[in-house]
Amino acid sequence: MRSGILGGLRGLAAALVMVALPGLAVAQSHGIAMYGEPALPPDFVSLPYANPDAPKGGRIVFGESGGFDSLNPFIVNGIAPAGLTAHTVETLMGRSFDEPFTLYGLLAESVNTDEARTYVEFTLREEARFSDGSPVTVEDVIWSFETLGTQGQPRYAAAWKKIGTVEQTGERSVKFTFNTEDRELPLILGLRPILKKAQWEGKDFTLSTLEAPIGSGPYVVAEFEPGKFITYRKNPDWWGADLPFNRGQHNLDEIRYDYFGDGGVVFEAFKAGVITSWRETNPVKWEQQYDFPAVVAGDVVKSVIPHSRPSGIEGFVMNTRRPLFQDWRVREALITAFNFELVNQTLNGGVQPRIASYFSNSPLGMVPGTPAEGRVAELLAPFTAELLPGALEGYALPVGDGTEANRGAIRTATALLEEAGWTVQDGVLKNAAGEPFAFEILITNGANDIINAATIYVEGLKRLGIEARVTTVDSAQYKERTTNYDFEMTHYIRSLSLSPGNEQTLYWGSAGVTEPGTRNWMGMTSPAAEAMIATMVAAADQTEFVAAVQALDRVLTTGRYVIPIWYSDVSRLAHRKELKYPERLPLYGDWPGFQPEVWWYQE
């Protein structure tokens, strides 16, 4: 415990240091929040949702559909296995999932910035070590930031471009000064993975590799077989075991991911006891198909985990790079023709709520059907000419009647398509050039609920004279095609937090129209959306931030890029009875940082 105690004292001392300069307030701190102050004091014992007395040992086995062919999760090329970054590579700071967006020291013992957040300075812990025993240095930090920003996945590039200068300010301190106003940037940099520079000398970082990265996290890669399984084992010499942030976390000795070709096979493997935890997304299945022997005997427990995060967006995204989907009236017609009420009843027993907007189920979401008011209206006003109908005056998703015919929705969709130049000729919807309205819906193998939803949708589209077809591919093909936007319509999911920021540019920024590997799968270009994101990251108070997110929500939802399906305000986890979790749940519920991080094994 000695290193943990010393680390706590250093954090306390750092939090008390104040340096007064003309026009500049600088504070070294144990943590940093997007707005306000961190909820936990410098001498906190553990995260509030972790059990500091949790026993150590045991294992958990997850099941994944698909496969992997690379152990470099930081680049566009290749498919990396689940958990590699989360379990083996640490960041300068760690996120508490009991607050919207607050970080506490991990590799860094302290962080400091000015009131305007024009820079951020991190001081590394003297005891921080990689898994091979070598110290984590400022040189490693600078190399990691630059390499990820210039050669890594596109999500790292935007932040790197906002860094004007980098300087080592002490033996264990590094300072990043920004060239752009962005109050979120200190937190974004605090979450960058830190890699060992020496491991990559003489190697091409952009190439897929089966050499695991040397990280400083609690686990190391123990065994793996590409496409079959990977096992992470607790590092007995892990340097950070006694940090307050880590107490009650990373309790298991072993974490394993087994890969299967089909999602249905994964569930059968769980029933057979091959894997030990399973997230169930179908509420009907949860109620009707969990009567197998292990549940009846009490060896498998069903746990329901509530959360307070936004719905995010999930559904079928239309690729507007394709001429077929460039007219908003066509996209609205396709949304109208999606018989959500029938799909939801058929697949979910009608119990799942529909996603109403990208940030629904939270204070950040727009209120469907209501006009923009106050600061939201002011932010959108300069973009009136580009905004689509509903953004200012109010928009709500169309509602079907739940019958297979869905006549009212089909009539509305037909009228929209006619306005856009599409008419039925001999039973086939065609444009003025006589070209039929036909497209492919791309889905990965094993996504059974999504395949079933798409199949019902295809049947409904026939009533409009539209020929749609469902194509299923393996995970490697899906990754290749979506990376290069080689699809017409596909399954799309983006989880969104209570503190959206710079990542929104990767999701919706115009660079993604042509740059491969971004998350802008719809190919949208919207100056209004980019302006709202800029306002979000520059907002100095919560009120301005919320207004900007609500305005962005209106732009995205009325852009009509995605046919929304359902969300769940709980997670349903079935697991072996020996796997336990704390009674006190985090704000975000079952999200990254929950399972397996704060779980433990107990006979």
Image (cartoon, grey):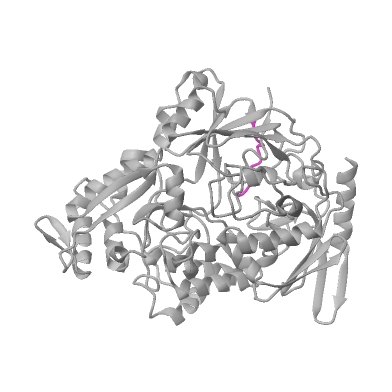
Count the numbered circles shown: 0
Q: Position of residue 413 (x, y in %)?
A: 22, 60
x 28%, y 50%: residue: 339
| Near-viewer residue (490 or 210) | 210
Say whether residue 462 is visible.
yes
| Quadrant for the C terminus in the image | top right
Q: Position of residue 400 (x, y in %)?
A: 27, 53
Where does the magenta region start and end? 580-587
Horizontal arrangement in the rendering, residue 32 relative to residue 461 (left or right)? right
Q: Is residue 582 a member of the stretch shown in magenta?
A: yes
Where, by quadrant of the figure, is residue 242 drawn? Answer: top right
| Quadrant for the N terminus in the image | top right
Residue 46 vs 235, above or below: the answer is: below
Residue 540 vs 67, above or below: the answer is: below
x 84%, y 53%: residue: 125
Q: Position of residue 404 (x, y in %)?
A: 21, 45
Say whether residue 189 is visible.
no
Q: Is residue 4 a member of the stretch shown in magenta?
A: no
Residue 19 vs 585, above or below: the answer is: below
Please identify the residue farthest to the front as the structure is shown. 202
Q: Position of residue 240 (x, y in %)?
A: 80, 44
| Near-viewer residue (88 or 181) | 88
x 64%, y 38%: residue: 596
| Near-viewer residue (90 or 597) | 90
| Near-viewer residue (280 or 316) | 316
Horizontal arrangement in the rendering, residue 503 relative to residue 5 (left or right)? left
Where, by quadrant of the figure, is residue 546 drawn? Answer: bottom right
Magenta span: chief secondary structure: loop
